[in-house]
Amino acid sequence: MFFDLKHTDVNSKARAGVLNTDHGSIETPIFMPVGTQGTVKALSPRDLKEVNASIILGNTYHLYMRPGHRLIEKMGGLHRFMGWDRAILTDSGGFQVFSLKELRKIDDEGILFQSHLDGSYHKFTPQLVLEIQRSLGSDIMMVLDECPPYPSTRDYALKSNQLTIDWARQAREIFSGWQPLYGHRQWLFAIVQGGTFKDIREQSARALMELDFPGYAIGGLAVGEPKDEMFDITDFCTEILPEQKPRYLMGVGMPDDILEAIERGVDMFDCVIPTRNARNGTVFTTEGKMVLKSARFKEDTKPVDANCQCYTCKNFSRAYLRHLYNANEILGLTLATIHNVHFYLWLVRQARKAILQDNYVSWKERILQKITRVVE
Ligand SMILES: CO[C@@H]1O[C@H](CNc2nc3cc4c(=O)[nH]c(N)nc4cc3[nH]2)[C@H]2OC(C)(C)O[C@@H]12
C-alpha cells in the first residue's frame, strides 16, 4: 500500500500516516526540503540524513534546463547522481516556468517558454514532463498543470482548470502503462487547481478523483493570496479529496502555516523558506524567529536553540554564527540550514505525536504561542 492512513485526530482533520516508497517509508505529516537543482542548498546528503530528512523535492524545470534529464539518465538517475538514496518528489515544472520567466505561450498542447539560462525555446507537454521525471527517477512525480496567477478572474480560472484536467487525463493515460527506468516504482500525483473559486475547486478535485491518482496536491496557493483564503481553500479541498490518499499542499510554508494546514487535513509540505531564510541569517527556534546577524547576539554564548538537538545547536554559539554571517563564511550557511531544516522536521514529527495522542489542536495552540514570537 503506497499510503497507510494510521490515525486521524478525534478533534480535528489532522492525520498521521505512512508513505511507502522504494526509497524508504515516510511518516506523515512530512516536510520536504527543497533541492531544486539536485541539492538542498548548503547541505550534503549526509547532513540531510543527520537531520532525518526522509524525502526531498527536486524541480523538473531546473534539472531539464541544467544539466539535462538525458545526462542525469546516463549517470543512473537523480538518486545516484546526487548521492541520495531516500525518496525524491519532483515538481513538474509548470509553476517554475510561471514564477521564473514571463510566460511565453500556453495552448492546449502545453507551455512554450524560453530558458532562463540561454533564451532557447522549449515546450513542456504532459508527455515531456513525465519523460523527464522518468529519466530523473523521482519516487513521486507531479502532472503538468497550470498554476493561475493570483488574483485570477473566474473565467480565467475556469479555462485554466479545464486545461489542467485535460493534461492530467493525458498523464494518467501514460502512467497506466508506466515502465519505470531504474527498477524502483514511481507514483504520480494530480494537482487540484481552481484559484479561490470553491465551485471550480470542487470541479477540479472531482474530475481528478475520477482519474484515480495515488495522491493529490493542492496547487494554486501560496502565490500571494491572503492566508485566510489559503486555509479556507485548503480546508474545502480536503473535505472532497479521498481520505485514504495523501494530500500535498504545494509551496507551504512558514512553520505556523504548516501547523494550520495539518489541522485541515494536509499530509505533505515543501517550501524554500527554511533553507532560503537560513542563508539570509534568519533561523526558527522553539522560542520564536531569530535574526542571527543582529548585534544583540555579538557575545551571546547560548546555542541558537537550547531545546534543539541538531549539530549546530549542540556545537556552536549564536555569537559564532553571527560572526560567520558577518564574515561571509560558507560554514554559516551550512550551520543555519542544518538547524532550520532540523527544526521543520522536528516540528512535523511533534505534530504527528500529538495527532496520535488525539491532542493535536491543544498542542498546536501551545506551540504557536512560542514559535511565532521574535527572539530579541
Ligand atoms: C513565487 O512565489 C514563491 O513560491 C513559493 C511557494 N508557493 C508555491 N505555490 C505553488 C503552486 C504550485 C502549483 O500550483 N503547481 C505546481 N506544479 N507547483 C506549485 C508550486 C508552488 N509553490 C512561495 O514561497 C515563498 C514565500 C518562498 O515564495 C513564494
Image (cartoon, rainbow, N blue to C red):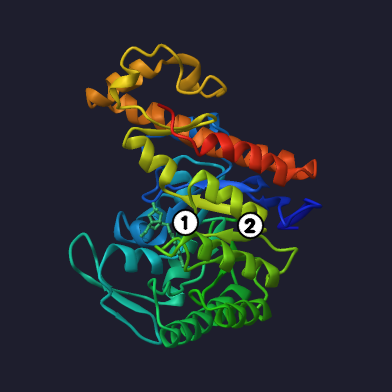
Residue at horizontal 37 percent and vertical 40 percent from the top? 277
| Disc sitting over residue 289 in the figure | none
Kind of residue sitting beneath label 1: Gly
Query: Which residue bears the numbered disc 2?
Result: 266
Residue at disc 2, CB closer than 8 Å to ligand 1: no
Residue 284 coordinates in the image, percent (x, y): 47, 34
Query: Which is more toward the observer, 344 or 152?
Result: 152
Kind of residue sitting beneath label 2: Val
- Cα gap from disc 2 to disc 1, whole angstroms: 12 Å
Q: Are marks 2 and 1 in contact (CB under 8 Å)?
A: no
Query: Which is more toward the observer, 211 or 82?
Result: 211
Quadrant that contains the N terminus: bottom right
Indicate whether 290 appears above or below 223. Answer: above
Indicate whether 226 appears above or below 127. Answer: above
Quadrant that contains the C terminus: top left
| Disc sitting over residue 251 in the figure | 1
Q: How many marks?
A: 2
Question: In the image, is 268 to the left or to the right of 301?
Answer: right
Residue at horizontal 42 percent and vertical 45 percent from the top? 273
Residue at horizontal 41 percent and vertical 15 percent from the top? 317
Disc on the earlier residue, 2 or 1: 1
In the structure shown, which secondary structural element does the residue marked by tag 1 occupy? loop
User: Dot 1 surroundings within 10 Å: few (below 14), some, or many (20 or more)?
Assistant: some
Residue 334 coordinates in the image, percent (x, y): 37, 29
Indicate whether 214 appears above or below 136. Answer: below
